[in-house]
Image: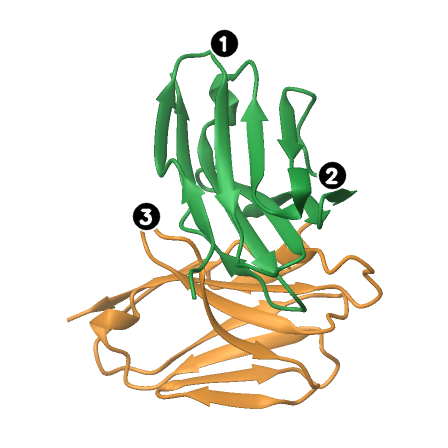
């Protein structure tokens, strides 16, 4: 059973377009992190959202944590080729004593110039 | 401040051989995790240390995998004997709180 479902799995769009990717679960997370991973590198943390309904912005990237802390979205405005990469959501489940972090499979994003 | 570092970055070994991966966490981070990503699959949890103690090793595939963290600093993950299905990228992460910081990974190829 996949605890964190990410959609879409793959997305290829033209430079300048907007897009949203999703991270969904039936479980409650105490926080959710978004990472971006590029080939040959480890995941790099983009943002952590903690409070239900929280919205965080990182330049053209907007991250939202669902009110029930079961889902999150990442919206990119005016996508650039440099946004290309694998976007992963991850987080520790509520009640998980040991902070074990669960990962989604990721959304592979390709921005065409 | 140095991030999480892993060594080696790549390893190609023959089936049946032994390989040891090393992870140096961020200084002061008590939590150290090992994860593995097999091609086409999600990153999967292997185990979690809190200082030198194994907090959770439920993700270790089998007894061919042995992780240690002597002194609560760096950690090693040994695979002995390696099998073809052990190929993948092994990530180490450390945290002192709810956010994990990852190393660049070790790409292991068993041929």
Disc marking residue A40:
3
Q: Chain of mark 1?
A: B
> In the rendered structure, which disc, 1 or 2, sits on the residue that comes first in sequence?
1
User: Which chain shows up in green?
Assistant: B
| Residue A16 image offset from top left, x and y in percent | 23, 83
Label 2 Cα crowd, 10 Å radius (few <14 / some 14-19 / many 20+): some
Q: Are marks 1 and 2 in contact (CB under 8 Å)?
A: no
Vertical side of B94 occupied by A48: above or below: below
- Residue denoted by label 1: B16
Q: CA distance from mark 1 to mark 2?
A: 23 Å
Q: Chain of mark 3?
A: A
Instruction: In the displayed orientation, state which residue is furthest to the front.
Output: B71
- Residue denoted by label 2: B57
Label 1 Cα crowd, 10 Å radius (few <14 / some 14-19 / many 20+): some
Q: Are marks 2 and 3 in contact (CB under 8 Å)?
A: no
User: Is the same chain shared between marks 1 and 2?
Assistant: yes
Placement of the N terminus of chain B among the 4 image quadrants: bottom left
Vertical side of A32 occupied by B69: above or below: above
| Residue at x 69%, y 21% (from the top left corner) | B63
Placement of the C terminus of chain B among the 4 image quadrants: top left
Q: CA distance from mark 2 to mark 3?
A: 26 Å
User: Which chain shows up in orange?
Assistant: A
């Amino acid at each position: 059973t996949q605890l964190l479902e990410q959609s879409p799995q793959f997305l290829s769009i033209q430079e300048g377009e907007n897009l949203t990717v999703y991270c969904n679960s039936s479980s409650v997370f105490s926080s959710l992190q978004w990472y971006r991973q590029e080939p040959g590198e480890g995941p790099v943390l983009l943002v952590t959202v903690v409070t239900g309904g929280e919205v965080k912005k990182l330049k053209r990237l907007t991250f939202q944590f669902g009110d029930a802390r079961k889902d999150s979205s990442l919206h990119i405005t005016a996508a650039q080729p440099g946004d290309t990469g694998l976007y992963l959501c991850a987080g520790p489940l509520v009640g998980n004593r040991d902070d074990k972090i669960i990962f989604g499979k990721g959304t592979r994003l390709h921005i065409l110039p | 401040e140095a991030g999480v570092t892993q060594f080696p970055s790549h390893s190609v070994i023959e089936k049946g051989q032994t390989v040891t991966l090393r992870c140096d966490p961020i200084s002061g981070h008590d939590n150290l995790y090992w994860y593995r990503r097999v091609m086409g699959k999600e990153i999967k949890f292997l185990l979690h240390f809190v200082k030198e103690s194994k907090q959770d090793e439920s993700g270790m595939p089998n007894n061919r995998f042995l992780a240690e963290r002597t002194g609560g600093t760096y950690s090693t993950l040994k695979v002995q004997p390696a099998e073809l299905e052990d190929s993948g990228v092994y990530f180490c992460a450390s945290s002192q709180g709810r956010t994990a910081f990852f190393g660049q990974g070790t790409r292991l190829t068993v041929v």
